Amino acid sequence: MAEVLCPQPQSEKQESIYHWLPTREEEPSRRQLRYISTFRSSIQREMEEKRKAPCQTMGIPKLQVPSPKEYLRKHSKKKVPKCTYEREKRLPGKPKLPPQSDRPLMGIHSEKNFVTTNAAEAIMAVAKKPLHACVDQRRGDKFLMDGSGLVQRFIKKKDFGVTPKYIQRWKKEAVDVRKERVAARRECLQKKRLTRLSSRERESILDGLKNNWEEINKDFQSLSVEITTIPQRLRKEKLETEMKQLEHDISALEKRRFIYIAGE
């Protein structure tokens, strides 16, 4: 910073030592430029596209303003329950009064003897069974025994002690399920049991194994003596392993006369 002597101001008439002191010239401060990324516009665009909810931004969300005609009505959000009450059917009205001109027939007499008919009906009627009641007080108060629970009526029923039909059905279903399980277990054991190979099958298997060994041996003999590449070496190893496996199977079949095969 350069130091400059302040000259004496012309407005002041008196001389002062402060006017001759060295002062510093203040340079204007340079403001640092703020860093702005080149991807600012693309990032803002991506953020606007990803924004789904309207209230994730600062300030008032931009929503569609409802029209003033669609205001909230009274009881619009309440669900009116359906009427499940059934009205009782009206009884038929009483018949109308007969007119004054309608007169009943008069002077009709019956020849039936009501005294004798009533006596005959009373004689022929079946006598009522007396009620099974019990008197428990001295005044003669009685109560019926049938509905009191003191009489063992259920023992005298026809189906007393008989197993209900639904229990019989359950027992039958349980027995059927048990039989199905036993049959499935037996079938599984029969599949897994050992079966003996016949002599013809044994000879045919031996002939097939020997023919396969001859074919593989022929391919093995046709290989070159000097093996230089990796595929040739891999082919030779594959043929050797197949020949060893066939030799092992042939020797096992020739040594054993009886051969058993387990089921799947």
Image (cartoon, helix red, strand yellow):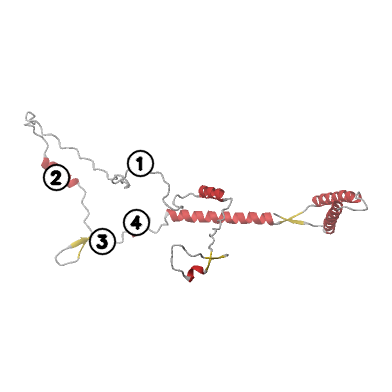
Residue 148 is marked as 3
Q: Is residue 202 left or right of residue 96?
A: right
Residue indicated by mark 2: 119
User: Residue at left 86%, top 54%?
Assistant: 233
Viewer-side label of 1, 4: 1
Check disc 1 and report the residue beneath it.
Answer: 67
Residue situated in front as seen by the camera: 113 or 145 = 145
Q: Nearer the viewer, mark 3 or mark 1?
A: 1
The amino acid beneath tag 2 is: Ala
Q: Which mark is residue 90?
A: none
Tag 3–tag 1 contact (CB < 8 Å): no
State how far apart marks 2 and 3 are (Cα): 37 Å
**Residue 63, horizontal then vertical, whole percent:** 41, 46
Name the quarter where the C terminus is drawn. bottom right
The residue located at (51%, 48%) in the rendering is 48
Query: Which sits earlier in the primary sequence, circle 4 or circle 2?
Result: 2
Q: Say which quarter of the image contains residue 94.
A: top left
Label 4 secondary element: loop
Q: CA distance from mark 3 to mark 1?
A: 75 Å
Q: CA distance from mark 4 to mark 3?
A: 18 Å
Q: Of circles 4 and 3, which is in front?
A: 3
Q: Earlier in the sequence, mark 2 or mark 3?
A: 2
Q: Earlier in the sequence, mark 4 or mark 3?
A: 3
Q: In this image, 53 relative to 109: left or right? A: right
Question: Which mark is in front, 4 or 2?
Answer: 4
Tag 4: amino acid: Lys
Name the amino acid, label 3.
Ser
Q: In this figure, which residue is indicated by the disc labeled 4?
A: 157
Give the label, 2 or 3, closer to the camera: 3
